[in-house]
Structures are given as structure tokens and as C-alpha cells.
Amino acid sequence: MPKRHLSGKRWQTPGILVLLGLEVGLARRGSSECSSVTPGPKACRGPTGRLEELGTGHNLPSQPTIAEEQQALNDAESALDPAFRQTIQVITANITKVKDGRLCPLSRLVETHSQQLKEIEERTTEMEDRISATEHTTGAAEKRIKALESQIQALTEHVDDLENRGRRKNIQIIGLPEEAEGSNPTRFFETWIPSLLGMEAKNGRVKIERAHRTLAPKPGPNQRPRPILIRFHNFVDKQRVLDAGRVSVKFQESSIMFFQDLSAAVMPKRKGFYEVKKHLRYTGAKYMMLYPATLKILHHGEARSFDSPERAMGKGFLLNQEKN
């Protein structure tokens, strides 16, 4: 059995053994340690191991030495009954077994959790690296996307401009009843347009490259007729037709209107000025639509241009116009 002196540290020998050793050793030596101090009173070590005065009250050392404590412990071990010593050993073994039985699963669990935490840390580090690389790539991609968006916008506007330039010699005719043009629209409109508008033309004809209805499904009897697209051979002839068509004309009791043919991107922008133009007609103000979708208003000697209906209606400009 290991031997430990009383040094303030945690004893590995069971506490009961130490206490018994102290009691037995000190009891054996108590009767023989009484001594007299010359001169002075006699003193002896009591049951607690402290020196007690037997005489006049002089103080004697009250603490045993380390050697005495070790000797007391050895005496206690020698005095223990073998059966009692075996019982203590069994109890100690059982305590150790219970401790190991409780701590071993916890140790394995802690080890498992430590391994899992290590794996999680490695995966987290890997994810952080991937996220950092992705953010770097995404930042570069965003710059490229913005540049491409700007380029696409510029190309779209350029294509739309080219499309409208290709339509410069085209007009749309609105309101002509279905099938009024017959089976040969081109030949019909060459003479019909100068006759309807009272235009001067060589041999009463304007040269037209092609003419046809829009490709929408044929409407029913009570529906509006499809617009007609006409492409002139000469830009000047097209402009003369638009100028002459500004007045109200009718054909077979149907109002006929002439418009410049424009791309699908520009037409909605021009239609947005419908309410503005309606108000201008009511007040008698003169206006014109400039390419691609700019409204120019002339009224009381004042000229204003607007690129959106909201700006035209804002600032009280139209609200202050009075009917002539």
C-alpha cells in the first residue's frame, strides 16, 4: 500500500486508514511520551496528538513532526486487521471500477464529439474558402454582366433605330373596311390614295412597292378592320401622303387615318401621349410628334417638347391651357 506523508496534498490512501493510523499510533505513544521539562511542569501528548501541560502552564510545541506522522501511519497499517485491510482494498477496487465504468463512456463520448467538432471545423474552413472564391468570381461576373447589359441596351436601341429607318417609306392606314382593297392591294392603293386625298400625281398614280393588311386574324363583321401597311417607292411621296392625310377624310362612311409606320418598341411610347393629345385638341393647341416619341406643343407662341406624357401633364402646363 502506498505511503504518503501529510503535506497538504490529496491523499491517495483512503481517509479512514489515515485516521485510524493516527489514532492508533498516537495512542500507543501517548503513555510513553510524557516528559518533564527541567525546570518546569511536566507535559505529555494527549489523545489528539497535542502536547498538554501538566504543570504550571508553560506552552509546549503543539504540532507533531512529519516523521512522527509517518511513523503513526506505518503503525496504523501494521495494526490493521488483515480482513479489514482486505475489505478496504475491495471497497477501493469497487470505487475504481465504478469510476472507470462511469468515466470511460464519457471519455469515449468526448473523444467522439471532439472528432466531430474537428470534422465540422475542417468543413467550415473549406466552405469559407469556397464562399470567398465564389464572392471573388461573382464580383468579377457582376462587372461583366453590367457591361453586357449596357452593351445590350445600346445594341437594342441601335437595332430599333435601324428598324425604324427601314420603315421610313412605310405608312399605316387605319379604318379602311375589310376587303375594300380587292385582290390586288398594291394596284388599288396606287390610284385610291391620290383620289381620296386630292393629291397631284403623275397619271393619277403614286408608285407603291407593296401593300397588305397586318397579319392579325381576320376580324368579325362588328370588329374593327385590320390596319394596312403600305411601302412607297419614293420617300417624298410618302411624306406628301402623310401631310395630306392630316385632315379628316372618309371612305364609305368610315373615317380613314394615315400614320407613320414605326417599330413595336416605339409605338407604345407614342400611344402613351393619347390623353395629352386629346386635351390639346380640346384646347386647340397645335402639336406634332417627333421621332421617336417626343411631343412638341405650340400654343400662344410658346413651344415645349416632352419625351413622356407625365412630363407633359406635369407642372400645370396643360392645365393652364384654355380652349380657343
Image (spheres, grey):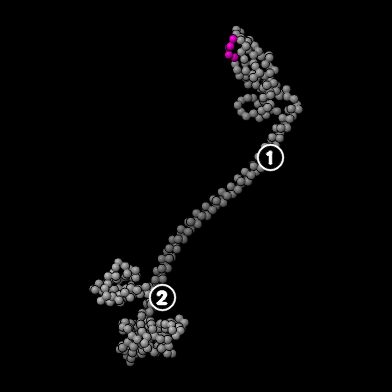
Q: Residue furthest bottom?
A: 203
Above or below: residue 170 compared with residue 47: below
> Which quarter of the picture shows residue 304?
bottom left
Between the C-alphas of marks 1 and 2, the distance is 84 Å
Query: Residue drawn 56% across and 48% down?
Result: 121
Residue position for label 1: 101
Q: What SS does tag 1 mark?
A: helix
**At which x and y percent is residue 163?**
40, 76
**Magenta stretch: dominant SS?**
loop
Kindly tell me whether residue 161 is visible in this rendering: no
Asked if residue 153 is among those painted magenta in the image, a careful observer would answer no
Q: Is residue 319 left or right of residue 142?
A: left
Residue type (three-letter) at the residue carrying disc 2: Ala
Kindly tell me whether residue 7 is visible in this rendering: yes
Above or below: residue 288 compared with residue 198: above
| Residue neighbourhood size for the residue with mark 1, other residues' Cα within 10 Å, grouped as few (<14), some (14–19), many (≥20) | few
**Which residues are the magenta region?**
56-60
Q: Is residue 72 left or right of residue 241?
A: right
Q: Quadrant of the C terminus?
A: bottom left
Q: Residue furthest right?
A: 83
Residue position for label 2: 264
Q: What SS does tag 2 mark?
A: loop
Q: Is tag 1's residue or tag 2's residue first in the polypeptide sequence?
A: 1
**At which x and y percent is residue 191?**
36, 90
Residue type (three-letter) at the residue carrying disc 1: Gly
Considering depth in this image, is 224 or 109 the residue closer to the camera?
224
Q: Quadrant of the N terminus?
A: top right
Query: Residue drawn 61% across and 10% down?
Result: 55
Query: Residue drawn 43% across and 88% down?
Result: 179
